[in-house]
Image: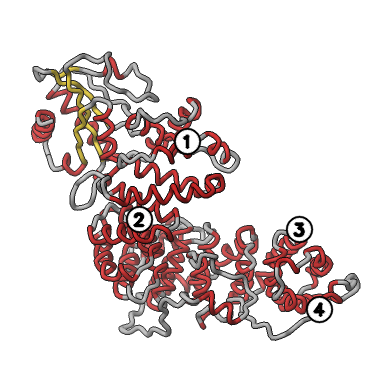
Amino acid sequence: MNNLIKSIIKKECRNRADLVLRLSRNINYKSGVINKMVKSKEKFNYVINVRTYGNQFINERKRCSDQNLYIYEDVNSDGRITENQYARQYLQHSIHFNETIVPQRKVEVIVTDEEAEKLLNRNWSTVDTVEVVSAFRILSYNIINKSDDDVNEIRYECILNALKENINNLTDNLLQEVLFNLLPFQKYLQDTKSFKDLIKLLDRHCEKQYKQWSINKMFLIADTFYCLDVYKNSNFIWKLLRKMNSKLNKLTPKNLVQLMFFVNINRKTPLNMYEVEVILEEHLNDLSINELGIIAMGFFKSKTKIKNPKLIKAIINRLICEINKADDITISALLKLIRYSMKYDEMINFKMLLDSIIPILPKLNLQCLMHIIHVYAKVHMYMKPLLDTVITRMYNEIKTARLKDIEKLTYALNIFSVDTTHPIYDKIIEEITNRLSNDKTEIFKQVLFKTILLSFIKIAIRGVFPLHLIKLAMDPSFINLRTDAYILGWEHSLLEYYLKIEKPEYTGPFLSEGILLTSTKRQWEIMQMNRKSMIDKIFTEIIYVLKEIILNDINLYTGRILPHSVKNHVVFGLDEKQNFISAESILSKIPDINIKKIDDTFPKNVKWIVLVVVHYKHTIRETNEPTGIIVAKLRQLKHIGYTPILITGNDWLKHSNIREKKDYLLHLIKNT
């Protein structure tokens, strides 16, 4: 195999990189397939759009109600749909997925309660499989129109037990009928032991049989598991995904869309995603923009980057050209994947995409806008019209916003250092206060607890501290509510350090010393793993220039000052006569877990200078201004008595030799 790979690399064939990656992933290919891959791809000069889709799900709940569907209702009580729900509805309403999606059924058969009662009271121990399945189908027509109060769960145990006893006798058609007719029961019986046991047996049966099925049959049964809301624990769906590794080249473009839907709902995948990427590139022009959005969900939710920059560029160009055809959720999904997959230095196309989004901002819903601003804040790309539009919409529509949407906006306010006098901060604090005042115990028990906490931290980074809310977040009773399902994260520790530095008047609870120490040390390890090699190089050069050329015999302190910050500081003093003074002997004796404030133990009338070295990725693009977290660090260093000087990677690398770097440092120091 190694010799084959070396031979391919030496050849000048256009797809040699693709071949090497394929062959190195332990996937067997026939020689004919490899020869086909080596051939240049045929190019077409035209594209036929078979069907386009606009915002087609606005009245989805009304249509479902009119059709009396028995399938699992895929809409939230507040009218919003999630990405999973949107993707499933898209498949449901497309003619291209008729054979692989659970069909809709109108209630054409009326089964009275008397007829149902006869079937429920029958002894099924001697009845053959076909008759059991037929009776179950009749009962499914009866239960569909019942209310929660009308259903006695115990009454259905006999028929469910009869199905369990006949599992091994089910033909493929009978299996499909049982799964379809289970759907009306799901609403009422999903938490009963009999229903759960039946689902487990059906899952095992599908595990045994699925290899004999066609791709369409596999996808149809898998879709039924999604409608039954049991896909997360299904071994069958996991094995189906694994089986698709050997069938990827046989998938139609529409099969690929549905496959990535299953990856999306599963959040992890055994698929060879590089192979999926190659097939996606081949079929890119056969997919609508909204189908690309569903595929993007699968990549992003499974934490898989698209590695081919040409494919990313092609997707961006499609989105730019068809931005008015793309649904809001599609725009969000594609933006997230593009941002996740692109390298920091490849963002020129991302900016072009932003230019195409600006004109349609008024048409987009609030949730989509929050996704957009979050994505662009992640890549530190600032555009005033976008930020102003998003802030205004949130201010006016905050009552309908999810807490996740509010948290996304606070992230952007932090990154772009939006002025703390802006009324949006008070609006956010007011809204969170109102929501917590209703039933704070329930909210703090949920995952929303972390979302709220992150919002507090992000506005605290800007220097805004809603102390009445922070006291609740730091309350041990709420922290203890989460100990069974949630390991205390860095968020509480970070908030505590911010309070100790900037809000000494805070009188609420803090973490115990042991928890704070454990959390902080764990974060230090993460910081060290994420440290950039470029920063280490710049840091070493700065120390060399200072020690060897500027300060001579003065010992520098290069350790930690703020326990919640990375070690990227160089500390020394400058007295009234412009003499350099060492801080190393004092600071090195203070434990790193402590905030190292300037106090009476330090020499008087000395300006204690801190050089703060940051990577260019901590600056806003095209401006070289620091992001909010760096602004907060500089502010906190001033709070505890230091004079911080910021050195960005971009500024340092402008100076090519030691003399220029020396002059640059001296200029910074003398002008503090």
Q: Report the amino acid beneath label 3.
A: Lys
Q: CA distance from mark 4 to mark 2?
A: 55 Å
Marks 4 & 3, CB-CB < 8 Å contact: no
Q: Is residue 407 left or right of residue 515?
A: left
Q: Is residue 545 left or right of residue 51?
A: left
Q: Report the amino acid beneath label 1.
A: Met
Seen at 53% across and 37% down, the residue is 479
Q: Identify the disc placed on residue 130.
A: 4
Label 2: which secondary element = helix
From the image, state whether disc 3 or disc 1 is nearer to you.
1
From the image, state whether disc 1 or disc 4 is nearer to you.
1
Marks 3 & 1, CB-CB < 8 Å contact: no
Q: Earlier in the sequence, mark 1 or mark 4?
A: 4
From the image, state whether disc 1 or disc 2 is nearer to you.
1
Q: CA distance from mark 3 to mark 1?
A: 39 Å
Seen at 28% across and 16% down, the residue is 586
For label 1, the residue is 474
Q: Identify the disc placed on residue 193.
A: 3
Viewer-proximal residue among 19 and 243 = 243
Label 3: which secondary element = helix
Label 4: which secondary element = helix
Q: Position of residue 567 (x, y in %)?
A: 31, 31
Q: Report the amino acid beneath label 2.
A: His
Q: Position of residue 329 (x, y in %)?
A: 42, 67
Q: Position of residue 37 (x, y in %)?
A: 41, 71
Q: Quadrant of residue 458?
A: top left
Viewer-proximal residue among 205 and 49 = 49
Q: CA distance from mark 3 to mark 2?
A: 43 Å
* Neighbour tally class for label 1: few under 14, some 14-19, many 20 plus, Cα within 10 Å: some
Q: Is residue 260 visible?
A: no
Q: Identify the disc placed on residue 374.
A: 2
State the quadrant of the C terminus: top left
